[in-house]
């Protein structure tokens, strides 16, 4: 019962201008009250900057949202204190776009954080990117970032 009362109070949307793209799945947004918030895109994990396709993923995210006003839908923070949210630009889901174009993996380990529709769309987008040899799927043996970080 408490979670039903607390969750809506935590959930929210905010709009802000993307002022920095740190990597393929993390941005800084100048949001309400002119505060900068670090936002981790929910549902995806992009290659690290130091691994193959990392710089390309960062540049693609920069091309998509750099300097633009985005909407962030969020209800939590990740373990690093970043806002964890779904980022949209003109109604387009930015994370889904990155997966579809082969610049990120669907982050299965956190699928429970996504709504039901996204738990269907994201894996489909990843399969389509794989079959189409899009982005990182051109690599004969792409290493997921969660594996790369453990090395």
Image (cartoon, helix red, strand yellow):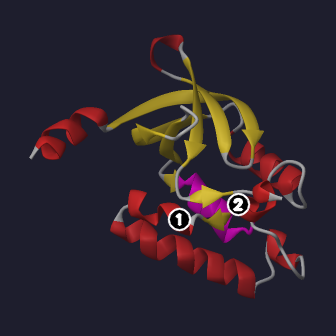
Q: Residues within 10 Å of mark 1 (few under 14, many from 20)?
A: few
47 relative position to 34: left or right: right
The residues colored magenta run 93-104
Name the quadrant containing residue 20.
top right
Seen in the picture, residue 98 relative to 15 is either above or below; the reply is: below
Q: Nearer the viewer, residue 145 or 102?
A: 145
Q: Residues within 10 Å of mark 2 (few under 14, many from 20)?
A: few
Q: Nearer the viewer, residue 46 or 148?
A: 148
Name the quadrant containing residue 127.
bottom right
Asked whether 102 falls inside the magenta stretch, the response is yes
- Mark-to-mark CA distance, 2 and 1: 10 Å
Residue 47, visible in the rendered structure: no
Mark 2 / mark 1, whichever is N-terminal: 1
Marks 2/1 in contact by CB < 8 Å: the verdict is yes
In the image, farthest residue toward the bottom: 131
- The residue to which callout 2 is attached is 146
Asked whether 87 falls inside the magenta stretch, the response is no
Please state the horizontal and vertical placement of residue 102, each as a whole percent of the image. 74, 69
Seen in the picture, residue 92 relative to 10 is either above or below; the reply is: below
- The residue to which callout 1 is attached is 109
Seen in the picture, residue 24 relative to 118 is either above or below; the reply is: above
68 relative position to 92: left or right: right
Please state the horizontal and vertical placement of residue 148, each as a whole percent of the image. 80, 60
The quarter of the rendered structure image containing the C terminus is bottom right
In the image, farthest residue toward the left: 1
Total marks placed: 2
Which residue is pictured at 74% across the width and 49% down the height?
24
Which residue is pictured at 44% across the width and 71% down the height?
119
Q: Secondary structure at mark 1?
A: helix
Which residue is pictured at 53% across the width and 15% down the height?
35
Please state the horizontal and vertical placement of residue 58, each as a whole percent of the image. 79, 47
Q: Secondary structure at mark 2?
A: helix
């Amino acid at each position: 019962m408490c979670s039903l009362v607390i969750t809506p109070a935590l959930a929210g949307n905010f709009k802000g201008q993307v002022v920095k793209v740190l990597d393929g799945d993390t941005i800084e947004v100048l949001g309400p009250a002119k505060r900068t918030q670090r936002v981790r895109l929910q549902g995806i994990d992009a290659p690290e900057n130091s691994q193959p396709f990392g710089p390309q993923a960062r540049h693609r995210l920069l091309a998509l949202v750099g300097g633009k006003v985005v909407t962030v839908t969020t209800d939590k923070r990740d373990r690093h204190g970043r806002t964890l949210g779904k980022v949209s630009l003109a109604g387009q889901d930015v994370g889904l776009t990155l997966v579809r174009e082969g610049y990120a993996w669907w982050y299965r380990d956190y699928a429970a954080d996504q709504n039901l529709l996204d738990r269907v769309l994201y894996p489909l987008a990843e399969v389509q990117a794989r079959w189409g040899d899009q982005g990182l799927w051109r690599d004969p043996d792409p290493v997921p970032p969660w594996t790369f970080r453990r090395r």
